[in-house]
Image: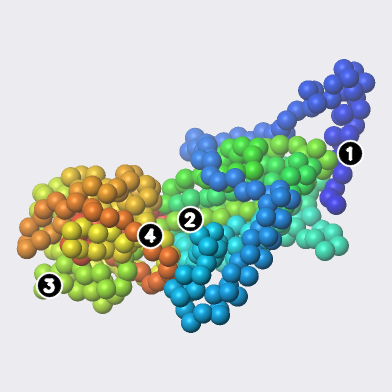
Amino acid sequence: MLRFNSTLLLAIVIVLSACGDAQQQLPNAVEQKTAEGPHVKTLEPKIGSTPDISVDAKKNLERLKQLYAKIDSIINTYPNYEAAKQHLTERQIEIWENEEAYSKEDHLDISTWGCSWYCGGGPDSIFASSMLPANQKLDYKAENVHDGSLRTAWVEGASGLGLGQSITFRFPKLSPPVTTVEIFNGYMKSEKVWQDNARVKQLKLYVNDQPYALLNLKDIKSKQIFAIDTLQGTKDGLYLKFEITEVYQGEKYEDVAISDIVFDGIGVHCFAEGTFIETPGGQVEIQDLKIGDKVLSWNELNQSIDTSTVLELAHQPHHNLYELQFSEIKITVTDDHPFYFNGIYYSVKENNQYGIQTKALNVGQQIHFLINGHTQPMELMAIKKLDRCEMTYTITKLDKNSLFFANGACVGVEGNVRVTVIGQNN
């Protein structure tokens, strides 16, 4: 299927002749020696979920899809789902309500359900230094590395083990900032193909052609997540290049493969339409705010209410929504937006995407609220995940302070992050 590793075969023959134990004598990685500048950091991954790429996973998904179709046909015989629900078993209800699990094209589909950071962010072009020529019905083009499927992969096309080969992503000018790189290493369409082909051990990341970091990858099938600085491009946009500097050898082929590289970031995380923002003249719904409007803000230094001018706004559709209930007040917000109490930030899911580390926002946690012109603590009573996608809004920059009030709650602006703006000459 791919280039045969003749060099590796020769090494096996030599070692077998000398020692009779090829497996122990073969090196597990090949490295390209590079000189790094003093500012090139080394990053280790956080290990994410491990996809099941086995034949059993494929068969199980096909079976569940058939069950889902059968249940759907039953439901269509009733006037609505609530009426049909009375005639379904608990297992049938579970299958039908978990549509996300059965709506994927196949078991190798890792695309995002609903909306995500990609609702507003993401690269507009991808190009590679080389790619393996197409083989019958298979191709190994650069775009494969960003198509949401483990069935495909970018495979470099240079001779040898691909050291020095690279893939580059271009993000448009002022595209929402990037904070995270997520990588599925190797050719993951099956266990055998993953073992047969080489995987990346280390990538050198360049930001607009300037060395930025060395990414050390594990030889595993799990998602590998790298937290990077908050990067945004201006002028000509943002270019992120990943160069292969070290590899894990495949059992059969020299080709180095990466199944998927995806990104996450900020600039698209916010509140639902209808959220009230406190202003000097009273409450204004967040979707009605305009650049130049005045809002009430919280001055952390002086511990006082202040007036700030809105400099930037953002709105994007989003699906990672939660309804938070504080006494009689409800707030619909994305899972990463920071809430403030006594110098500490909290969010439904812990993150550091705003330049600060948030703690988990749990039931019972107090948050500062603005009530009748004064701040006072209010306890979170309930958290409810919402299974829908809708337009959301936020303030991304104020002329001063980094906290404002949404439905009374003290929350952070996205401008609170420390963004590394990448210009034309950076």
Residue at 29% x, 48% y is 362
The tag on residue 264 is 2
Q: Is residue 360 above or below residue 134?
A: above
- N-terminal of the pair, mark 2 or mark 1, is 1
Q: Nearer the viewer, mark 1 or mark 3?
A: 3
Residue at 42% x, 68% y is 388
Q: Which residue is mark 4?
A: 385
- N-terminal of the pair, mark 4 or mark 1, is 1
The tag on residue 46 is none
- N-terminal of the pair, mark 2 or mark 3, is 2
- Label 3 sits on a secondary structure element that is strand
Q: Is residue 302 visible?
A: yes
- Label 4 sits on a secondary structure element that is strand
- The number of callouts visible is 4
Q: Position of residue 258 (x, y in %)?
A: 67, 50
- Label 2 sits on a secondary structure element that is strand
Q: Position of residue 239 (x, y in %)?
A: 55, 57
Q: Which residue is mark 1?
A: 6
Residue ranking furthest to the bottom: 79
Q: For the residue marked with disc 1, what is the amino acid?
A: Ser
Distance, label 2 to label 3, CA atoms, is 35 Å
Q: Nearer the viewer, mark 4 or mark 1?
A: 4
Q: Are marks 2 and 4 in contact (CB under 8 Å)?
A: no
Instruction: Determine whether, in the image, residue 41 is placed left or right of residue 421.
Output: right
Residue at 60% x, 75% y is 73
The tag on residue 282 is 3
- N-terminal of the pair, mark 3 or mark 4, is 3
Q: Position of residue 255 (x, y in %)?
A: 78, 46
In front: 277, or 208?
Answer: 277
